[in-house]
Image (spheres, helix red, strand yellow):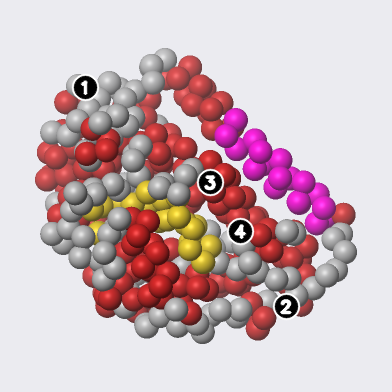
């Protein structure tokens, strides 16, 4: 029986998540929308929406969703979305999943999901909302991610922020690999995907329990309809898959920046198959950053539980129904 499990693409920003989204969107059964700004904010504010068994509260939630930034990028009729959310099962995941299901219906496809790099650091919450979801994590050489983040028009001007971004994403990837089984979590490297797309896409399809389709290796054909024109930092998605940017950090980063990246990343590079180019002794600042990132990694789950507890106290509402009940696997839970 064909699966209807939702699919979520995650990774460090500028690691190839949009390319991978388009590869999956090219599959005749899968539709993944442009990035949105409502999934995790809705989860963080879930106690404020009230008991979703009340259709009026579901309508309020739906109105909030359709008024969030970038909702228009989905190309959906707002009133139709509101009505569909009101008619959906009374849980937060069902409301959000209904929006993605409507997006997939635009293309006549049965499987839906989403792509957003930052979900990588919120996987426990994401899987609370979508218990049968499949997570596809793309990994890219941290030095190339840093080089690309430096050039992104929306990005910070602080090199340390970019280094932190990749290190935290790498830690979250390692944490996910330990926590989730091979039926839930799949890691693919950007470099492998652009060097020889078909075998790695076939492995991805096997994970998703789907047949491989050749169109997946031509994501540029999907860019016009699935990447908003104003996102000029995604212009390369309109071009054929290429290895042009593999190891481009050698030209795009200075010697000092490379040394700083490698000193802070430490063993993370090697654990994902990337070799350091320098063997400089870490400075005291580098050591402090390594310790800070390691502590942050260990405390991340505890911090999430503490935030949830504070939300219950602040709003004086009990924990609302969160898990979606839209797919065959979700309805069985």
Give the image location of residue 290, x and y in percent.
76, 51
* Residue in the foreground of this view, choosing between 165 and 209: 209
Q: Is residue 188 above or below residue 185?
A: below
Residue linked to disc 4: 166
Image quadrant where one finds the C terminus: top left
Task: Name which residue lies at 26% across and 64% down.
Answer: 211
* Residue in the foreground of this view, choosing between 128 and 196: 196
Q: Is residue 147 above or below residue 242?
A: above
Task: Please say whether residue 107 is one of the residues in the magenta stretch.
Answer: no
Compute the Cα span from label 3 to label 4: 15 Å
Task: Name which residue lies at 17% across and 58% down.
Answer: 109
Task: Name which residue lies at 50% across and 73% down.
Answer: 192
Q: Nearer the viewer, mark 4 or mark 2?
A: 4
Residue linked to disc 3: 176
Q: Sequence order check: which comes first, mark 3 or mark 4?
A: 4
Number of other residues with Cα within 10 Å of mark 2, as a class: few under 14, some 14 to 19, many 20 or more:
few
Task: Please say whether residue 293 is one of the residues in the magenta stretch.
Answer: yes
Task: Name which residue lies at 87% across and 64% down.
Answer: 281
* Residue in the foreground of this view, choosing between 203 and 194: 203
Residue linked to disc 2: 254
Q: Identify the mark at residue 53; answer none if there is no mark.
A: 1
**Range of the magenta residues?**
285-302
Pointers 1 and 4 in contact (C-beta within 8 Å): no
């Amino acid at each position: 029986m064909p699966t209807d499990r939702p699919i979520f693409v995650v990774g460090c920003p500028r690691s190839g998540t949009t390319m991978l989204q388009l590869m999956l969107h090219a599959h005749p059964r899968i539709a993944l929308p442009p990035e949105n700004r409502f999934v995790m904010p809705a989860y963080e504010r879930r106690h404020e929406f009230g008991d979703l068994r009340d259709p009026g509260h579901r309508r309020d939630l739906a109105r909030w969703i359709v008024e969030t930034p970038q909702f228009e990028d989905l190309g959906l009729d707002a009133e139709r979305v509101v009505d569909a959310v009101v008619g959906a099962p009374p849980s937060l995941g069902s409301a959000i999943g209904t929006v993605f299901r409507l997006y997939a219906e635009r293309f006549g496809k049965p499987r839906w999901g989403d792509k957003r790099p930052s979900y990588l650091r919120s996987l426990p919450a994401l899987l609370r909302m979508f218990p049968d979801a499949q997570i596809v994590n793309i990994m890219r050489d941290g030095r190339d991610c840093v080089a690309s983040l430096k050039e992104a028009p929306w990005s910070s001007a602080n090199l340390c922020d970019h280094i932190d971004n990749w290190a935290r994403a790498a830690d979250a990837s390692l944490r996910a690999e330990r926590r989730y089984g091979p039926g839930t979590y799949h890691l693919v490297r950007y470099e492998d995907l652009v060097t020889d797309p078909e075998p790695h896409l076939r492995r991805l399809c096997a994970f998703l329990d789907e047949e491989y389709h050749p169109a997946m290796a031509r994501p540029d054909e999907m860019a016009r309809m699935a990447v908003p024109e104003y996102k000029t930092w995604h212009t390369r998605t309109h071009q054929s898959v290429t290895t042009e940017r593999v190891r481009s950090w050698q030209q795009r980063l200075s010697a000092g920046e490379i040394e700083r990246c490698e000193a802070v990343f430490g063993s993370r590079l090697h654990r994902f198959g990337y070799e350091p180019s320098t063997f400089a002794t870490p400075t005291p600042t580098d050591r402090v950053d390594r310790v800070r990132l390691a502590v942050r990694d260990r405390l991340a789950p505890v911090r999430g539980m503490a935030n949830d507890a504070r939300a219950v106290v602040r709003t004086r509402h009990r924990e609302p129904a969160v898990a979606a009940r839209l797919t065959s696997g979700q309805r069985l839970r």
